[in-house]
Image (cartoon, coloured by chain):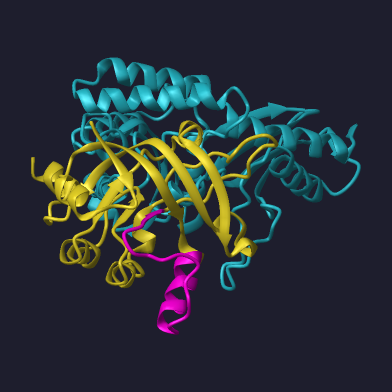
Amino acid sequence: MRIIPPELITQKVAELVSDCNYFLPHDVVNALKEAAENEDDKKAKTILYKIIENHKTAKKGVYPLCQDTGIAVVYLESGNEVSVSGDIYRAINKGVEEGYSKSFLRKSVANPLTRSNTGTNTPAIIHTSLIKGPNIRISIMTKGAGSENKGAMKMLSPADGAQAIMDFVLETVKKAGASACPPYIVGVGIGGNMETCALLAKKSLLRSVNDFNGGDKEALKLEKDLLREINMLGIGPLGFGGRTTALAVKVETFPCHIASLPVAVCIQCHSARHKTITI
Amino acid sequence: MKRITVPLDSETIEDLETGDEVMISGVIYTMRDAAHAKITEMIKKRARLPFDLANQVIYYCGPTPAKPGNIIGSCGPTTSSRMDSFTPLLLEHGLKGMIGKGERSAEVKDAIHKFGAVYFSALGGLGADYARDVKKSEVIAFPELGPEAIYRLEIEDFFAVVIDDAKGNDLYMQLSVN
């Protein structure tokens, strides 16, 4: 059994939340560049290049990509041949607190009723799963509220089928409109139950922009159809019109009850900040 | 591209049209959810406000903390619709402009028209680049709110687009019709 000290987890998590907020992932930058080249609308093109410029400013390490440096969503995958010599959840939260403080990130976590700020950007939202092997994998998404607020979940009827799923996703993207900072990456979770479809939708955003769901023919079709339809809505980069309303659509499925068709849509803004490391 | 200075005078407002791209220079005040709630309460109690709303422009923004030696941190716009329920009262008390992102409610658009004000959208998610347009920054009220405090910002050539002009036009509506 491999033993990892909690201090190492804390240090790595602090680095991750900082990296997320100053460095946009390469695949997102490339997708933005490609969209800028393919955009016919002059204003939309200009805005896409401005988004790319902002990423260049942020990576110098002085100003984070966005003032909403997010709430930290942590996907913890722990191997069955590794153990942390201490409280791993405490270590993660300590890492989030240190990272947000040392890297001058905004602390945006508050009590939901009193609205009093916790002052540390904790607690993080931690999802844990078990994997094989001697390693711990940590993925962190620092997700802003502008896009998160536009997510939606609906219990459809099995009889409604794929068209109802398409309609619900399109309606959700339309409602997000200009507010949630398009071009979006749209995560869609289908099946499972109420919480499972939401988890699928959110976690799908960790996939690379160019990664299509190759393992599931129907999901792949939905990804392609939805992307085409969304980009015909005309919302465009930051809502000023154009064909680039989404860079990608990610569909994940899970079997569900014969009487159910749960669907969740998670909207990710153009500042799609996430990073994964293996310890 | 139009160059305008803030606070806004009536001539400038009359000249602005939906869809105009503008470079804004002058003084603006940040206010988001918590500050709006506090200011609204103060107006209702007829208390003295931390700044006179007349002709001013509010920026819906909660910046990141400034790194040592810097004026401000990242400072892009937040979603305007969360402020909708507070906005008509502020317009009634002399506010002339708002900078944020995204659509406003019908009530807000009506109030913008009625009181001859203007609503701009800044570019969401471009907070790093907006930081460079801020020449001076000072917390003038509610420091206990942290990023939600009211900051007085001196800005230079701050890019925004007119969404709702004083004549009652709305850019998002125009785009969806087209």
Please identify the quarter of the rendering in which residue A130 is found: top right
Chain B's colour is yellow
Residue B139 rendering spot, x and y as whole percentages: 58, 55
Residue A152 rendering spot, x and y as whole percentages: 38, 54
Q: Nearer the viewer, residue A98 or B80?
A: B80
Q: Is residue A80 above or below residue B144?
A: above
* The magenta stretch spans residue B133: no
* The magenta stretch spans residue B44: yes
Question: Which chain gets the cyan colouring?
Answer: A
Q: Is residue A60 above or below residue B140?
A: above
Q: Nearer the viewer, residue A271 or B138?
A: B138
Quadrant that contains the N terminus of chain B: top left
Quadrant that contains the C terminus of chain B: top left
Q: Nearer the viewer, residue A96 or A162?
A: A96
Image side of residue A107 versus residue B150, left or right = right
Residue A104 rendering spot, x and y as whole percentages: 67, 40
Q: Residue furthest left?
A: B178
Residue B162 rendering spot, x and y as whole percentages: 23, 44
Residue interval drawn in magenta = B35-59
Picture residue at 21% right of the left edge, 45% below the top: A163
Picture residue at 34% right of the left edge, 25% below the top: A48
Image side of residue A110 versus residue A251, left or right = right
Q: Residue furthest bottom?
A: B45
> Can residue A252 be seen in the rendering of this structure?
no
Picture residue at 32% right of the left edge, 43% below the top: B5
Picture residue at 19% right of the left edge, 24% below the top: A41
